[in-house]
Image: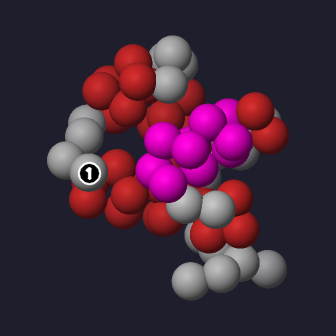
């Protein structure tokens, strides 16, 4: 199964007009972790997925690429 999370995260961030640093600050994370996620080198923990889904007002299923 193809991992679409990194692509979806970047698209959501860009749509909102945010840089990686701005998103990281909003979620109290490092810019490095956002970069790792967007490059598909790491996957977020459940707590981070929940924070992302609330921040972008989307479901975790959407972030995971399960629903469109």
Q: Quadrant of the C terminus?
A: bottom right
Task: Residue under label 1, please give it.
Answer: 16
**Which stretch did the figure color magenta?**
48-57
Q: Residue furthest left?
A: 17
The quarter of the displayed image where residue 49 is located: top right
Q: Is residue 51 magenta?
A: yes
The chief SS type of the magenta part is helix
Q: Quadrant of the N terminus?
A: bottom right
Report whether residue 64 is seen: no
Indicate whether 40 appears above or below 28. Answer: below
Indicate whether 62 appears above or below 37. Answer: below
Report the residue at 26% width, 51% height from top.
16
Q: Is residue 10 magenta?
A: no
Residue 41: x and y in percent read 63, 45
> In this orientation, which residue lies closer to the viewer: 37 or 61?
61
Report the residue at 26% width, 59% height from top.
15
Q: Colour scheme used in the picture?
A: secondary structure
Indicate whether 14 appears above or below 25. Answer: below
Characterize the local packing of mark 1: few (<14), some (14-19) or many (20 or more) Cα atoms within 10 angstroms. Answer: few
């Amino acid at each position: 199964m193809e991992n679409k999370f990194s692509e979806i995260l970047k698209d959501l961030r860009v749509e909102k007009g945010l840089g990686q640093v701005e998103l990281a600050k909003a979620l109290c994370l490092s810019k490095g972790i956002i970069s790792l996620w967007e490059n598909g080198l790491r996957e977020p923990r459940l707590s981070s997925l929940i924070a992302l889904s609330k921040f972008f007002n989307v479901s975790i299923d959407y972030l995971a690429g399960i629903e469109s």
